[in-house]
Image (cartoon, coloured by chain):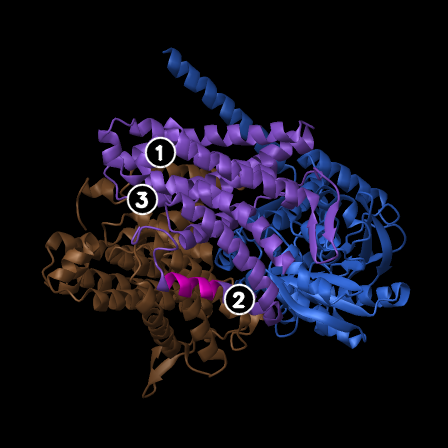
Amino acid sequence: MFGFTSKQLARVGIFLFMIFIGVPLIVGATGRWDFYFTLTSVALLAIASAGVWLTFYIGRINIGQGAFALIGAYVSAILVVKAGWSFWISLPAAGLFAAVVAILIGLPILRLRGVYFAMITLVLTQVVTLTALALPITNGARGISNIPLPSGISVFGIPILPDFAAMENTKLAFYYTACILMIITYAALYRLVNSRLGHLCRSMQQNEELASSIGVNISYIRIVIFAISSFFGGIGGAMFGSIAQSVYPSSFQVADSVNFMLNCFLGGLGYVFGPMLGTLVLYFGWDLLFEFGKYQMLIYSTILIVIIRFLPNGLLSIRFGKGGDK
Amino acid sequence: MEQILANGVYLGSQYAMIALGLTLIFALMNVLNFAHGQMYVIGGFVTYTFYGQWGVPFVLALVMSCVTLAILGALIERYLFAPVIKGPAREESTMLLAAGIAFFLDAVILLVFGEKQSGVPKIVDGVFNYDFRLIMPYDRILICVLAILSIVAFIGLMQYTKTGRALRALAQDRTAAQLMGVNVDRYSMIGFALGAMLAGLVGGLLVTITGVNLGMGGATSIKAFMMVMIGGAGVISGAIWDGIILGFMEAIGLALLYQYGDITYLLIFVSLMIFLAIRPQGLMGKPWG
Amino acid sequence: MQRRSLIQAALTAATLTAFGVTSALAENPALKIGFVGVTSGPAAAWGISNQRSMEARAAWLNETGGYTIGGTTYDIEIVSFDDQKDPKRAIAGMEKMAQEGIHYVVGPNVDDGAAAVRPVAESNGIMYFPYAFPKSLYQAPASNAVLGMVANYQSGPAIYKYLMENKGVKTVAFIAANESDPLSQRDGGVAAAKELGLEVVSDNVTYQVDTTDFTPVLTPVMRSRPDLLVLSGVSPANAPQLIRSARELGFQGIISTETAQDAGVLAEGAGDLAKGFISVGGASTPELASPMMNEFVDRYTEMFGEYNDESNTKVYALEYILETLKAEPSAIDDVEAFKAKMDTFEAPNPYMNGDAKLRYVGMSSFGQKRQVAVPLVVNVYQDGAFETLFVAEVD
C-alpha cells in the first residue's frame, strides 16, 4: 500500500495505537492526568519543530520558528476575538498568514546561508516580539486574554467537531486534536521528503550551485519550503494560544526558537521523525526531572551534554546506525 | 553629539571584546558558542567574588577571571567539542552541544552564585562633566581604556606571535594548516581557551559598572551573535568593527529615535535585518560563511 | 559473598531510613500547597524569593508541630514547579498541581503566565495567587485568582500623591523595560499621574531587558528635567544601574518605583547614589516588623544563607491561604467555600506590630475581593537599608 513495507505499516500502526489508545489507557490506569497537557505540548511543539527540520533539509539553520508560532497565535486570537471567526477556520488562516509572511521575508533572506541565515532568523524572532508589543491590534503589552475555547462545527445540523466550551474535560479533546494535527504534519513531511521536491531539496542541501547548474530552480524551492515550514509554525502557535486562552508578546520568544532547533538536533537531522522524538525527550524530560527541585536544570543539561557527546547524530542514530538515512 | 560619540565608543569597545571571543571560536572551529554569554557571566562573578567579596586587588581579580575561563574553555574544548567535531556528526550538531553547555553553566551559576544581582564597589569615583555636553563617569572611561588596551594586546598576539600565526592559519584553512605542520588539536584548544578568556575578561571588567546577574548570559550571547553578523562571522577585524558599529548604532539610535518610544528597538532590529539582506556577508566577512 | 552482604546491609539501612522517615511524617497528614513560578534562568530571583518564603514558613510550622485546621493538624508541604518564565510551562505546572490534588497555589510571577494558567485553574478548582497586575485576572468573570501583593495602579497614586504634597513634585517622567509587565505598569502609572494633576514630561522611553549601559537610554529622559523619575516595573537587577546612570547624568530629582527591591542589591550596585530611592516594600522595616516577622527573617536567613527583602511581601500569600482554611475548614478541598469565606474573612496580621488585620480587599480595583491586604509600605533607601516613608492601606 502506497509503497510502504508491511514492517513500516506495522510500526505506524503501533505508533497510532499508542498515542490514541495506549496513552489514554496509561493515563487512566496511573491517574496522571497532567501528562495530557505535557503530551499535547509535545505534539504542538513537534509540529513547529517539523518546520524547522524542513528548513534544515534545504541546508538552512532556522532559529526563527518562534516568530512564526507567535504570528500564528496572534492571527488566530485576533480572528477569534475581534472578528468572531470560528477557531477551526482561524487555524488554517493562521498557518497561511505565517506562510505569506515567510514568503515576503524569505525573498531577501533566503539568499543567506550558514550562520548568516541562522542569525537573521534569530533577529526575526526579536522583531516579531517587538512588533507584537508595539502594534495596537495585538493589544501591545497587555496581550490578548480571555480567548474563548474552540466552538463546535456542524454541517447541515450534523456535528463534525464538538464545542470545547461545553466539554467537561477539554484536556483529552485538546490532546486528540494536537495528535491528529501532528500526524497530519508528519505524514505530509514524510510525503514531501519522498517526493521529487524532496530529492531536489537533498541536492540543494549538498550543493546549491551544483543543483542550480543542472536546472533546479533553487530560489523557488527555497521559498516554497520556507513557507511550508512557517505554516507548521503558525499552526502550532495558534493551537497553543487556544489552549492557554491567551497570547502575549512573550508567548514565543528567542528561547523557543532555539528550542525548536535543538529538538531537531536532538532527534537527528537525518530522520523525518527526529524532531518528534527530540521534542518529546527535551520537553517531557524537563517535566520528568521535576522531582529534583533545584538540581533539575543541572541534571537536565548534563544529560543533554552526554547525549550529544556520544550520539552527535541525534537519538535516532542509535537504531539506524551511523550513516543511515531517514 | 559629543555624548553620542562617547557613548558609542564606550559601548563599542565592550561589545567588540565580547564579539572577539565569539568570532575567534567560530573562526577556528565553526562552532557557534551559545555558552559565550554564560562564560561572560562567570567571568563577572569570579571578579565579584575576588574583588567584591574577598577584597583582592581589582587587577588580580581580573587575572583570576581570565585564568578560570581559560581553563574552563580548554576543558570544554578538549573533552566536549573536539570529540564531537572529529566524529561523523554534521557540523551543526555542535550547536546543540553549545546550548547544552549554556544550560549547564546557567545551572552551575545559579547553584554557586545565587540568583541575585551582584555588584562591586566603584573602582574610581567621580564623573567627568564637560559643561553638561559630555558626561562620563571616570570608571567608565577607565574600563573603556582597559577594553581598548586588551583589544590592542589581542591583535598584537594574533599578529606577531607564533601562537597567533598558527591560530590565523587554522582559521583560514584547517587542512592546509595541518599540512604545514600546525598542531591542530593543540591550537584549537588554545584558541577556544583564548576565546573563553576574552569573555571572562570583559565580564570581569564590566562587573564594576553594570554588576552581574544570572540572567545576563543568554541576552549577552544573542547580542554577541548579532555583532558577529554585522561584521562578518569569523573575521577578527570584522568583530572589532561590528562591536563598534553596534555600539554606535545603539547610541545614535537611542539618541535620535527615542521619541518613537516603544518602537526604538524595533527600528534598530529591522534596520539590522535590512542591512543583512543587502549585505549578507557583513562588513568584511567571507560571503556564505 | 562480601559484595552481597554489603548490598544487604545497604538495603536494610535504606529500608530502615525509609521507615524512619515515614513514621516521622506519619504523625501528621500533609497539606500540600503549590508554587508555580520561575526559579531558574534570567528571572530566577522573582520566583526563588517566593519559593523560599514558603519553604521557610512551612519548615517553621512543621517544626513547631504543624498547623491545625478544623481539628486536624497538618504538616505543610510545599510543591514547587519551575515554569522558566514560559507561559506554556506554567500551564504544565498548574496541571501538575491539579494532579497532586492541590487546590491552593502561589504564583505565577508574570502577566503572561498568570493569564495562561487561568483555564486550568478554573477547570480544576484551584485558587492561585499570582504576582501579576492585569485587572482582567481578578475582575469577574474570573474568580480563581487572588492578587498576592499591592498592584502598581494602587501604590503608584499613593506615592505620587505623597510626593506632590510633601516634596512639591510637579513633573514626572516614566521609563520602562520593553516587556509586557513593565509596559503595562507604565501605562497604569501614567494614567494615575495624569489623574492626580501631575505633568507627565516623558512617558515613551523604553530599554531592552538586556541593556548593560543605561546612559544613552536615560539621556533624553533627563533632558525633560522631571521632578520625579518613575522606573516602571523595574527588576531588582536593573534598578541599581538605572539609578546610577541617572545620578551620574546629573539628575537631582526623586527616583521611585512601584516594585519591591532588595536593599543589599541596591547597596552593591549603586551605593550612596541610591540614597533617597523610593520603592514599595513588605513589612520588615524595624518599626513595623513584629517579633514573628523578625523570627521569619532569621529562619529564612539560616535556611538559605541570605535574606531577600522581597520575601517580606511574599511571606503573606501562604499565611492567607492557611488562615483562611483555618477559618473555613471545609475549604480545604472546596474552593467555592474558600471564595465565600473571602468576603468576610478577618484575622490578626502576625507579621505587623499593632492591630493590623489579614483580610481580602480589591473592591475598588476589581469589584470583588480578590486581593490580599498587605500593608502598602513605602520605603526610602538610606545608607544600605530601607526606612519607612509612609504606610497606607488598599481597599
Mark 1: which secondary structure?
helix
- The disc, 1 or 3, on the residue closer to the chain's N-terminal end is 3
Q: Which chain is blue?
A: C
In the displayed structure, C242 sits above or below B119; it is below
Image quadrant containing the C terminus of chain C: bottom right
Q: Nearer the viewer, residue A256 or C87?
A: A256
Q: Which chain is brown?
A: A
Q: Which residues are magenta?
A: B269-277
Q: Looking at the picture, which amino acid does disc 1 mark?
A: Leu
CB contact under 8 Å: marks 2 and 3: no
Q: Looking at the picture, which amino acid does disc 2 mark?
A: Pro
* CA neighbours of label 1 inside 10 A, class few (<14), some (14 to 19), many (20+): many
Tell me where residue C78 appears, x and y as whole percent: 61, 45
Residue under pointer 3: B93
Tell me where residue A320 appears, x and y as whole percent: 19, 43
User: Is residue C146 something that shows in the picture?
Assistant: no
Q: Name the residue at 14% across, 56% down.
A: A210
Residue under pointer 2: C119
Task: Establish whether labels 2 and 1 are both on one chain.
Answer: no
For this view, does C12 lie left or right of residue A39? right
Q: Name the residue at 82% across, 43% down.
A: C383
Q: Looking at the picture, which amino acid does disc 3 mark?
A: Ser
Which chain letter matches label 2? Answer: C
Q: Is residue B254 magenta?
A: no
Q: Which chain is purple?
A: B
Q: In whole angstroms, how far apart are the C-alphas of marks 1 and 3?
A: 23 Å
In the displayed structure, B176 sits above or below C39; it is above
* CA neighbours of label 3 inside 10 A, class few (<14), some (14 to 19), many (20+): many
User: Is residue A315 something that shows in the picture?
Assistant: yes
Residue under pointer 1: B167
